[in-house]
Image: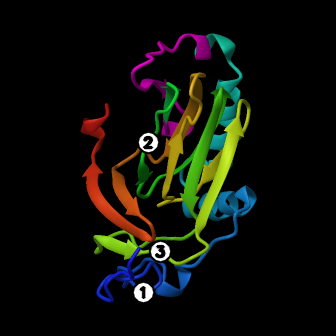
Amino acid sequence: MSSPSPAVPTAASVPFPAGSASPAAAVALAPAVSARVGWAARAVSSGPTVAELLAFVRRAAEDTALIASLPLDPEGRTWVRLDGPGGSEAWLIGWPPGTGTGWHDHADSVGAFTTASGTLKEHSLAVRLPTDGWKTLELNEGVDRSQELAAGQGRAFAQNHVHEVLNASDSVHAVSVHAYYPPLPRIRRFSRTGALLRLEQTERPEDWQ
């Protein structure tokens, strides 16, 4: 792959909007879930913490009757809205083999998800991106993270967490439970080519509800 144009900003050099993290914050974050949970719990103090969201999705994932109630479609993902704790937004999602979300974030919402059946794979970026004012970023080396989450395993994340989730199995359906607070104001969707991350579109609640 040829070197990107010098005009393309890096994740560590894009000016941050006033009131957001400084450019120095656009470096790899500690991968430990506990560190992310602690940071996000302080950031969103008026509603359920990410620890509470994670506890909720874990309990829901253990509810066999709830999981069995989700209609599954071999051709595409299915979902059902759930009542999340403290005004949060929650979803039960089915993943046919080979399906995924693509790269995206959840704007100012914190969240958590747990796999109820099957196995999901998450690819994420251990970097805080500027929230606005950019179209293309060149990612620094060492920011990629990947993990597999089997049934009963989950994770929590802070605001502007960029990731993609997929069912890499070629034969087994997966089901998961997700919760976000505040309820999702938008989802930003990205494409990625090597180190280049490009903002493609922004979805609003009316696009998925």
| Image disc number at residue 139 | 3
Q: CA distance from mark 3 to mark 1?
A: 10 Å
Q: Amino acid at mark 2?
A: Thr
Q: CA distance from mark 2 to mark 1?
A: 28 Å
Counting residues from the start of the chain, the first of labels 2 and 1 encountered is: 1
Q: Residue at x 63, y 54 (%)?
A: 146
Counting residues from the start of the chain, the first of labels 3 and 1 encountered is: 1
Q: Is residue 111 left or right of residue 37?
A: left
Q: Which is closer to the viewer, label 3 or label 1?
A: 3
Q: CA distance from mark 3 to mark 2?
A: 20 Å
Task: Give the magenta range.
Answer: 67-89
Q: Badge 3: how crowded within 10 Å, few (<14), some, or many (20+)?
A: many
Q: Secondary structure at mark 2?
A: loop
Tag 2 residue: 101
Instruction: In the rendered view, tell whether residue 18 sits above or below residue 119.
Output: below
Q: Position of residue 160 (x, y in %)?
A: 47, 61
Tag 1 residue: 13
- Asked if disc 3 and disc 1 are in contact, CB closer than 8 Å, the reply is no
Q: Is residue 113 visible?
A: no
Q: Is residue 84 magenta?
A: yes
Q: Amino acid at mark 3?
A: Leu
Q: Is residue 92 left or right of residue 50?
A: left
Q: Amino acid at mark 1?
A: Ser
Q: Quadrant of residue 38?
A: bottom right
Q: Is residue 29 magenta?
A: no
Q: Nearer the viewer, residue 171 or 189?
A: 171
Q: Nearer the viewer, residue 143 or 38?
A: 143
Q: Residue at x 70, y 63 (%)?
A: 31
Q: Secondary structure at mark 1?
A: loop
Q: Is residue 98 visible?
A: yes
Q: Position of residue 52 (x, y in %)?
A: 66, 43
Q: Position of residue 78 (x, y in %)?
A: 43, 23
